[in-house]
């Protein structure tokens, strides 16, 4: 194992890479460990219109490519690795990957969040055979076919609108009667003739595992209890994300839903460990807030190191 | 991006290639627009090297070859299917790390050659 780094960043979405950019410019020679989902959630989006600086919008993968190149330009070292464990009881901290281990005087956690699933057995059985969490990957398979999207936020509506390029019809299934999404997304979705909504509805099951393909979703109206079936060839699950914090269980404080707790900026309960982006944000979860908190984590880490702790 | 060890399959060569007796064949179903597929590419390349002699690795671009994926019931990518004698013995949907993939494939592979 090599010598201790000043700063190791776990995660390569907008939070992690902005933290890398700032710590690189502070001459801290950060090491970024880019995991399986390198680039984070934006890698699976198409046009991003609300990240400031791009008045005509920018493609998600392109934006992440820019931020990555910017961090590298100033000296961030970016390696691929799947982090399997961290040891935070003493400094320098230890970060183990499948291949090797790194030690860090300061650690920035930017591991983000992953797609939440409905939690149904048949959802897992039919993943890739009609159930999907990636509209940009799988829309192709649904040309002129009816599909459902589960969810009511910006991601769900963004996916629904994207999928109208392929599908004959998209039914958005939402458990409440009001959408969480931004007004502009709501207006776009509501105006789209290929999109309809099932309000106050949850998905109790996905059929038909026996056939090895999605043929329908079983719906329940949460107000009346009525059960029905909606024939669809695909179900896209866009009900939110869960923070990627299992690595830190028992070491970093988390709230009841698994988000890392931060205070005084990006500080965790362990001195020298900072958290930024969706891994510690249940409220905002935007690319720009993730970037902003990445900058904060970098500055907090720099001050921590300067104070000679 | 693909290493020399990896075969490229098409709709017309698919059945013949996976039906051959001999080593199991791992097929990587992918497409150009699929970010996670591109991330999986180098992982599959690494597996092709590390498990050389124990399995054959092939890729099928679903955009250029739409009928094979449809016949196999694939509606999501990336999907990895491991074939033995023309039958699917293992399937992995979505982006998965190298060590996890090795664990899933190991029981189906030809024994490692003695060094």
Image: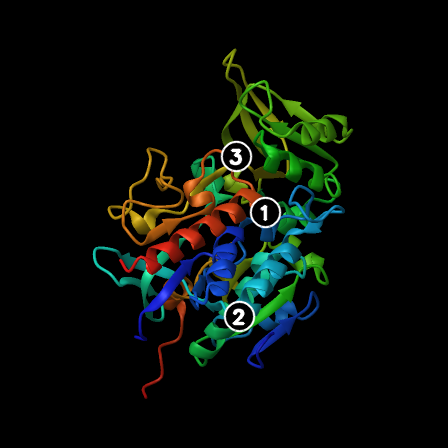
Q: Residues within 10 Å of mark 3 (few under 14, many from 20)?
A: many
- Percent of width and height locating residue B109: 40, 71
Instruction: Reply above or below: A248 against A235.
Output: below
Which residue is drawn at the image coordinates 48% and 60% (left, top)? Answer: A20
**Mark 3 chain:** A
| Residue A170 percent location from the top left of the image | 69, 33
Q: Which mark is residue B109?
A: none
The chain holding disc 1 is A
Report if the CB atoms under discs 3 and 1 are less than 8 Å apart.
Answer: no
- Toward the top, the furthest residue is A224
Distance CA(mark 3)–CA(mark 2): 30 Å
Front residue of A163/A142: it is A163
Q: Which residue is mark 2?
A: B42
Viewer-closest of B110 and A219: A219
Residue sitting at x 58%, y 25%: A229
Q: Circle 3 is placed at which residue position? A: A239
Query: Share a chain, discs 3 and 2?
Result: no
The chain to which mark 2 is attached is B
Q: Return the residue at label 1.
A: A134
Question: Is residue B54 shown to the viewer in this render?
Answer: yes
Q: Secondary structure at mark 2?
A: helix
Labels 1, 2: one chain: no
The CA span between labels 1 and 2 is 20 Å
């Amino acid at each position: 194992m090599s010598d201790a780094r000043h700063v190791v960043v776990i995660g390569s979405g907008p939070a992690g890479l902005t933290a890398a950019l700032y710590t690189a410019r502070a001459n801290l020679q950060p090491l970024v460990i880019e995991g399986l989902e390198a680039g984070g959630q934006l890698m699976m989006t198409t046009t991003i219109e609300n990240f400031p600086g791009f008045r005509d919008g920018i493609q998600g993968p392109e934006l992440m490519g820019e931020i990555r190149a910017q961090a590298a330009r100033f000296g961030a070292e970016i390696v691929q690795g799947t982090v399997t464990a961290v040891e935070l009881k003493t400094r320098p901290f230890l970060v183990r990957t499948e291949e090797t281990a790194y030690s860090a005087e300061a650690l920035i956690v930017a591991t983000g969040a992953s797609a939440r699933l409905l939690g149904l057995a048949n959802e897992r059985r039919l993943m890739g055979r009609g159930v999907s969490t990636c509209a940009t990957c799988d829309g192709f398979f649904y040309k002129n076919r009816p599909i459902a999207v589960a969810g009511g936020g910006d991601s769900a509506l963004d996916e629904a609108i994207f999928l109208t390029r392929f599908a004959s019809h998209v039914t958005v299934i939402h458990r409440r009667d009001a959408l969480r999404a931004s007004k502009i997304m709501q207006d776009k979705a509501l105006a789209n003739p290929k999109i309809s909504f099932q309000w106050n509805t949850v998905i109790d099951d996905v059929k038909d595992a026996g056939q090895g393909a999605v043929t329908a979703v079983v719906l329940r109206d949460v107000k009346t209890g009525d059960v029905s079936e909606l024939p669809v060839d695909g179900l896209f699950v866009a009900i939110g994300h869960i923070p990627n914090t299992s690595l830190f269980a028992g070491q970093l404080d988390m709230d009841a839903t698994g988000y890392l707790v931060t205070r005084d900026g990006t500080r965790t309960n362990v001195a020298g460990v900072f958290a930024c982006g969706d891994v510690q944000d249940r409220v905002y979860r935007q690319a720009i807030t993730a970037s902003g908190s990445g900058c904060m984590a970098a500055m907090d880490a720099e001050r921590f190191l300067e104070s000679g702790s | 991006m693909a290493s020399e060890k990896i075969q490229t399959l098409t709709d017309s060569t698919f059945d013949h290639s996976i039906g051959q007796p001999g080593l199991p064949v791992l097929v990587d179903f992918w497409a150009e627009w699929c970010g996670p597929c591109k991330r999986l590419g180098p992982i599959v390349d690494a597996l092709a090297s590390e498990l050389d002699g124990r399995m054959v690795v092939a890729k099928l671009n679903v955009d250029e070859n739409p009928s094979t994926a449809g016949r196999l019931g694939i509606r999501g990518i990336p999907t990895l299917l491991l074939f033995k004698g023309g039958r699917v013995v293992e399937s992995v949907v979505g982006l998965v790390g190298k060590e996890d993939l090795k664990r899933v494939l190991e029981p189906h592979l030809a024994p490692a050659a003695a060094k």
